[in-house]
Image: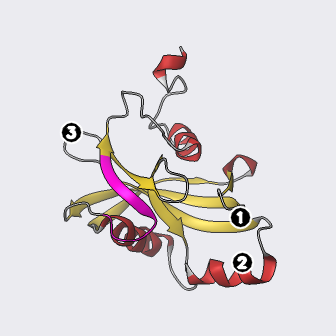
Amino acid sequence: MGYIMDLREKVGSQPLLMPGACVLVFNEAGHLLLQKRSDSQDWGTIGGALELGESLEEAAGRELYEEAGLRAEEFRFVDLLSGKDMYYKYPHGDEIYNVMAVYEAMNVEGTPRVNDDEGLELRYFSLYEPISELNPFTEHVLKKTGYLSKWYPFDRL
């Protein structure tokens, strides 16, 4: 994440527009791969910011490998999310407004493994059962893209 880190040195924690990609990986049972994030200690999707000169699909592939040690044959575009509800404040105080391309990874190769310091653990989850410690921003993205119903988590009914 060199480009964003360079910007942060100049602007501090103030809000930035952050274009990036989110990658959804499903196993044969239809369960979604999530990573336990090292910064917030909760479960989130795989993804991250665009680097200079990189396409959104290239960012999706890079992030998938960096965070989970996986490669995908192709990426199916799901949605492009932006706006005030895509605001996120990191636990350390940096603020961003995401412009996020959401992709589903197709024909995934490899075995999921923590491959960088952004994640602590990787695990597949059913989206038909409550996920303990689901990152609220991830929940928001999954609802906006239709992967979670508006009634999730079910224990709030």
**Residue 127 in sight in this render:** yes
Q: At numbered mark 2, what does the secondary structure look like: helix, strand or loop?
A: helix
Depicted 15 relative to depicted 149: above or below: below
* Residues under numbered marks 1 and 2 in contact, where contact means CB atoms less than 8 Å apart: yes
Report the colour scheme: secondary structure
Image quadrant occupied by the N terminus: bottom right
Instruction: Name the residue type under label 2.
Output: Arg
Q: Which mark is residue 6?
A: none
Instruction: Name the residue type under label 1.
Output: Asp
Local crowd at mark 1 within 10 Å, few (<14), some, or many (≥20)? Answer: some
For the view shown, which residue lies furthest in the top direction?
A: 157
Closer mark to the observer between disc 3 and disc 2: 2
Residue at horizontal 49 percent and vertical 18 percent from the top: 155
Which one is nearer the viewer's eye here, 135 or 31? 135
Local crowd at mark 3 within 10 Å, few (<14), some, or many (≥20)? Answer: few
Dot 3 or dot 2, earlier in sequence: 2
Q: At numbered mark 3, what does the secondary structure look like: helix, strand or loop?
A: loop
Residue at horizontal 24 percent and vertical 61 percent from the top: 108
- Residue that carries the numbered disc 2 in the rendered image: 8
117 drawn magenta: yes
Counting from the top left corner in percent of width and height, residue 96 is at 70, 62
Q: Which residues are magenta?
A: 114-123
Local crowd at mark 2 within 10 Å, few (<14), some, or many (≥20)? Answer: some
Q: At numbered mark 1, what does the secondary structure look like: helix, strand or loop?
A: loop
Q: Which mark is residue 94?
A: 1
Residue 131 placement: quadrant: top left
Q: Which mark is residue 29?
A: 3
Instruction: Name the residue type under label 3.
Output: Ala
Dot 3 or dot 1, earlier in sequence: 3
Counting from the top left corner in percent of width and height, residue 8 is at 72, 77
Dot 1 or dot 2, earlier in sequence: 2
Which one is nearer the viewer's eye here, 146 or 113? 113
